[in-house]
Amino acid sequence: MPPTGRLASRESTPSATEPLKGDEFLCRTMTSVGTADASPGTVDTGRLEVGETRDGSTFGLPVAVAGPLHDGDELNGVGVVRRVVPRIDPDELAGTVIVVGVVNYHAFQVAEHRNPIDDTKMNRAYPGDENGTSSERIAAATYDVARNADLVLDLHQGSTSRMIDEVRVRCGRRHRLHTQCLDLAKTFGCGYVLDQKGPDGQLARVAPSDGVPAVDPELGGAVGWDEASIAKGVEGVFNVLRGYDFLSGDPGIEAQTRAKTFDQYGSPVGGLVRFHHDLGDRVSADETLFEVTDVFGELKARITADNDGIFWRSRRLPQVATGEYVCSVGKTVDTY
């Protein structure tokens, strides 16, 4: 999913056992990004220039920097950013918070998911290429910031599906920073964690390979704002700021429910879907997940779960065609 906002550095690097922030980078010494330059005790906003539009004019990503005294349609990340930045008091901050408010610039302008200039998902382009495509250049510019951070939060949204609020750990369970990324996800504290290696080009998969713990909060799924998910994202960002001593206070860390993979279900027939579960419900193998009826309510198909798990994601619209995606169940579930 295209990143929409990042936080980043503190005075000491977290250990693998410590609980470990749209796009936010938490950084140790960096105090300027693009035209945003925060002197001690201030917050500044500006632009990070990354290229030119089709008429030849330059464009830049909106950035904010808070200095210490010592994919285009995924809007929930932007909703988190616009609530978090005004609440950061640099007088209370130990470390630097760098926020990139919109990463997938061209997609944001037209309210689409993919960059319309090169038809690319922004979160498949990392670490980027400064001489590459539009998306690769944007990825390269933002990754120059991310690789110097101590922590990275890459805020996303599930687009048109209904989704559980979750944090995704994308580095893979054998990665040397896996434990640190799990701890960062736990500190953010959505309640649910997907611990599954991500595809090539995802920021939360690439950054750990450069030694930077990173996670990918997926803040619900909706077209436009999802206020409940935005509120959870704001809480998560401040949990991380407190949990890693950027701000004083208790992050209130709680146990998280983790899934390590999915079963995905499509419809064997066309018709109207009737779900038997809400997001977050526990389901058992052979239990009915959904039924498909015709427009007169006549049952056409009943789909049951293959494994025990959690009802994790579902389509928003009731109408479905043969073979079309309907829902997902998170499986191999535990608590940590």
Image (cartoon, helix red, strand yellow):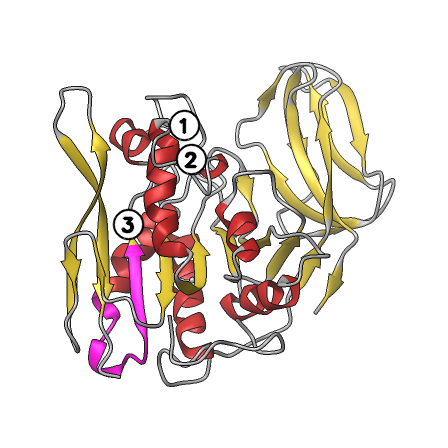
Q: Image point 42% across, 59% down: which residue?
A: 233
**Pointer 1: what residue?**
114
Label 1 environment density (alpha carbons within 10 Å; few <14, some 14–19, many ≥20): many
Q: Position of residue 145 (x, y in %)?
A: 34, 55
Callout 1 touching callout 2 (CB < 8 Å): yes
Residue 1 visible in the picture: no
**In the picture, residue 265 is in which quadrant?**
top right
Q: Check residue 90 for magenta coloring.
A: yes
Q: Answer with mark 2 or mark 3, whichever residue precedes in sequence.
A: 3
Magenta residues, as a range?
A: 86-99
User: Between 71 and 326, which is closer to the camera in this rendering?
Assistant: 71
Q: Position of residue 46 (x, y in %)?
A: 15, 52
Secondary structure under the numbered disc 1 in the rendered image: loop
Label 2 environment density (alpha carbons within 10 Å; few <14, some 14–19, many ≥20): many
Q: Image point 27% across, 26% down: which residue?
A: 110
**Quadrant, the C terminus:** bottom right
The correct choice, above or below, for 245 with respect to 315 in the image is below
Disc 3/disc 1 C-alpha distance (Å): 17 Å
**Pointer 3: what residue?**
101
Disc sitting over residue 288 in the figure: none
